Image (cartoon, helix red, strand yellow):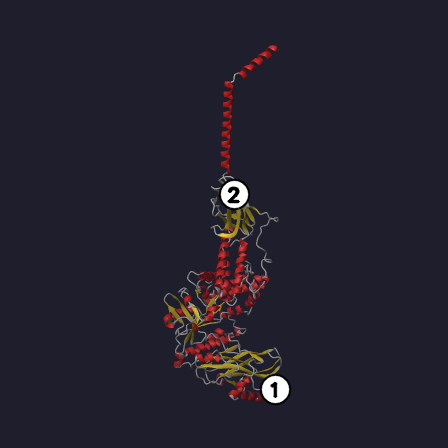
Amino acid sequence: MLLVTAAALVGSVLVPGVAAAAEAASTRTPLRVSIATLAPSTIPQRGRVTLTGRITNQSGRTWTDLYVYLLTSSDPITSRSGLARAAATDATTPVGSRRTADGLYDKVGDLAPGASVPYRLSVRRQDLGISGRPGVYWVGVHVLGAIDGARDTLTDGRARTFMPLLPRPGTAAAARDHTTLSLLVPLKAPVQRSSDTRLAGTAAWDRALAADGRLDRLLRLSRQARQPLTWVVDPALLDAVGSLADGNPALDTGPDDTARANSASGSPSGSPSGSPSGSPSGSPSGPPSASTSGSPSDQPSGSRGSGSEAGGSLTRQRARAWLEEFRRQAPTHTVASVPYADLDVAAALRGSPGSPGGSLYARATRLSAATLATYGVDSAVPVVDPVSGYLPEQVLGRVSARTPVVLRQSALPDASEPVVVESDRAPVLLADTRAGAGGPSPNSQYAALAFRQRLLSDAALHAQSTDRDTPLVVSTPAYWNPGDAWSVSRFFSGLDRPWLRMVDLPGVVAGASTTTAKEAGPLVYPKSEASAELPTANLLATGDLTRTGALFAALLTLNDTVDDVLSRAALLGSSTSARGAADEARAGTTRTSDAVRARMAQVHIEGPPFVMMSGESGPIQVTMVNDLAETVTVGLTMSTSGSQLRIAPHDPVTLGPGRRTSIRLEASSRDIGVHAVTLKVTDAAGVPLGSETRFSVRTSHVGTVIWVIMGVGAALLFLTIAVRLIRRVRRRRSTHGPLLRDRGDRAGREVGA
């Protein structure tokens, strides 16, 4: 035991240069050490400091006779800039000394390859070896062991974090050093859907929603909060979980809730018209079945999932439980919502006011509010929270003045306050990137305890500075995973300190001193950010799918929700999460548009190849066909450019599933010739849906000509008869002989008889 202690002491008093060189010999230690709990979260004036965690042997050899020592720094870090530099140091950089006195270490024995063992260190305040001056101290763990009985003074495993010390209670400094913190916790995730709007990557979603998955951790961690907390929610995440809760169905084109209610109450909802389809089976021709409706390539690359996975009862149960927990917690937190699908606002609003991105931004904002309302949140605060923390100056001017914009401090480095305002412009909240940068290596910097200790240490130094009256606004990472030890970290209870007051995002805006935009200077927008924006092609693809969805909804008689569903799917193609894979996201949006158009093309018109009109007017017979499995309402638009042929408008018709009907069109013409006719299928409002037929119509005035010819012929006939009669009468009057001879011959024949 004395030899072990002596070796540890020697290791702590080696010449700094030699020790540093020895420690730097290997940046990856054979033993991985975690700090799972630290109580209390700040250094007390009296009592004990207790650390717990685990040691894992990540080497291929057995370590024996393991000892765990507490490491502390004797002098504090007294500035936030100094804390940032300390957090950025290499894990092998010497930062303090091991506490090696009897009773200050933990003996954990031997550890086989791949095995792990817990440790616990509990040290009295007076044994910490610190100076006692207010500030932030290093607190860590060193593990030393032996291989084949050989031991050295090098650290075989290490972990470290920060621990603040506030002024002694009752002093003037303690009464003065208070500050305010606003913590933002994003609930976001990249969402991808296949061309039939099914959620893609269902296996990954199932893991995230499972017990101790990332999304499960975030909600259960938030449940521990007793202080004001702001959720920054992307409602596309809620819809994704909602899809899983419903079994991940494809796009539903059937009657919506309103139509079903009307049907149940006996209200007419439109009866199918037309004659049955000529299908041999007698069944309507509907969309392909789920088993053949799309190949795996229809789903985003790297995120493919099967409907069967998502349709499992366990996945549905997890999704429903998660949504129920969200609904339960939402009233206890402040909920802020980003534009639906976390729209790339920089790309959308960068163009002119009339560009397509402006309408997408407005639609995404409305969809966010509507979506959250369906999940029980009626008063969400609209915010713009770019993942990168940057936004162009011109874009900021186009965001609503009632919508806070959360940016990183480096976007306005000259601002002296965390809230920057300007008349008729959105207020800017500057998130403190140093406090949100997480803990030091070698541990996971964003593990719950590491993140909390860095946040708490920055807040303590802020409270001890002249800026203490300025609140800190800190956001966790956009896709934060608090780690596997989140449940024992006591994250929020560690933030419950008498010198730290927590407020929500609206509270910061309402109560903080503000800097004007003129004082803060122009927004910094790095070139790398500009180059990372989604291309305009993605926005155009999103707009195209949105318009296509609106047409599809207008076609379906009993469904008014298809356009809403497709708008949500369209916005995924312009999401901030699509940066870096813009082509893939755009291709997915285009595939969905093509799939919807293919469905609409199942409603089509059939016309004759050629039509003869024998008079000035006449009928044209065409057939309207609905091969969809849903009732549709369609109209026709006719064009005969460059001719005098006119076709009378026809009222829209309603066709049931798999039905067809004949339509008689009345045409008229004042000229003679061949006319090209185009008939297009439209919705009830006359907007073309894509299907059309072309044929030719030959027109003539043959009826009139015939009557004229017949009249002239009759006149000539009667004239000819009259002329012959007149001539015959004249001839008989001028020659009597033939008449007397006839009489004489007749008389002589009579005498002879």
| Nearer to the camera, 675 or 10 | 675
Quick check: 380 left or right of 274? left
Mark closer to the observer (2, 1): 2
The residue that appears at 56% across and 14% down in the rendered structure is 743
Q: From this viewpoint, is residue 266 visible? A: no
| Three-letter residue code for mark 1 | Ala
| Three-letter residue code for mark 2 | Arg
Residue 314 point in image, percent of width and height: 58, 64
Where is the C terminus found, in terms of image quarters? top right
Where is the N terminus found, in terms of image quarters? bottom right
- Residue marked by disc 1: 150
Q: CA distance from mark 2 to mark 1?
A: 105 Å
Q: From this viewpoint, is residue 353 visible? A: yes
- Residue marked by disc 2: 698
**Quadrant of the image occupied by residue 199:** bottom right
Q: Secondary structure at mark 1?
A: strand
